[in-house]
Image (cartoon, helix red, strand yellow):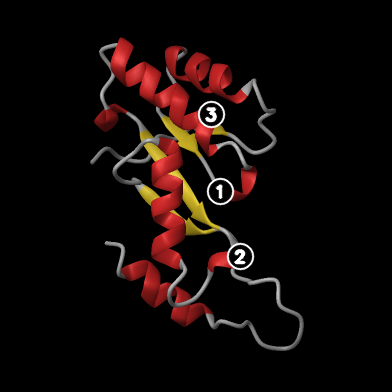
Amino acid sequence: HIPIPLVGLGTWKGRPGQTKAAVQDAIRAGYRHIDCAAYYGNETEIGEALDNLFRNTQLRRSDIFVTGKLWNAWHGKGNVEAACRRSLRDLKLRHFDLYLIHWPVTGNRGPDVVPAIDETWREMEKLV
């Protein structure tokens, strides 16, 4: 594993049809950390960019640090692993270097976070 690079490319608000080129350009310019999230809706383009770079340059997967994030709607037992696998599939990757809970909320209304954060965290730990 590589340490987390100090500077990374954030892919939030990456425009459809432009994210692939932005990721490729950033990596060619020296970026080695790509910050992704299912919620951004651009993981497929990012996956195309990474796959293209790994196939057509001397870069290897181990050269790039990739962060992914679990979206609010996928918290809780039975959802976390499926969401992670979907993101990995879209990104054309076998693993994340870092996988985070995007926000410590689920979008429900009321005084309690449902499902509870500790339930989601236990499911996140199973991914390791």
Mark 1: which secondary structure?
helix
67 relative position to 16: left or right: left
Image quarter (top left, top right, bottom left or bottom right) of the C terminus: bottom left
Residue at numbered disc 2: 72
Kindly state the secondary structure of the residue where label 2 is placed.
Answer: helix
Q: Is residue 124 left or right of residue 18?
A: left
74 versus 25 height, above or below = below
Q: Quadrant of residue 115?
A: bottom right
Counting residues from the N terminus, which is met first, the one under dot 1 or under dot 2? 1
Quadrant where the N terminus sits is top left
Residue 45: image tag: 3
Amino acid residing under circle 3: Glu
Q: Amino acid at mark 1?
A: Ala
- Residue corresponding to mark 1: 38
Q: Residues within 10 Å of mark 1 (few under 14, many from 20)?
A: many
> Could you tell me how far apart the alpha carbons at marks 3 and 1 are, in whole angstroms?
12 Å
State the residue lying farthest toward the bottom: 111
Q: Secondary structure at mark 3?
A: helix
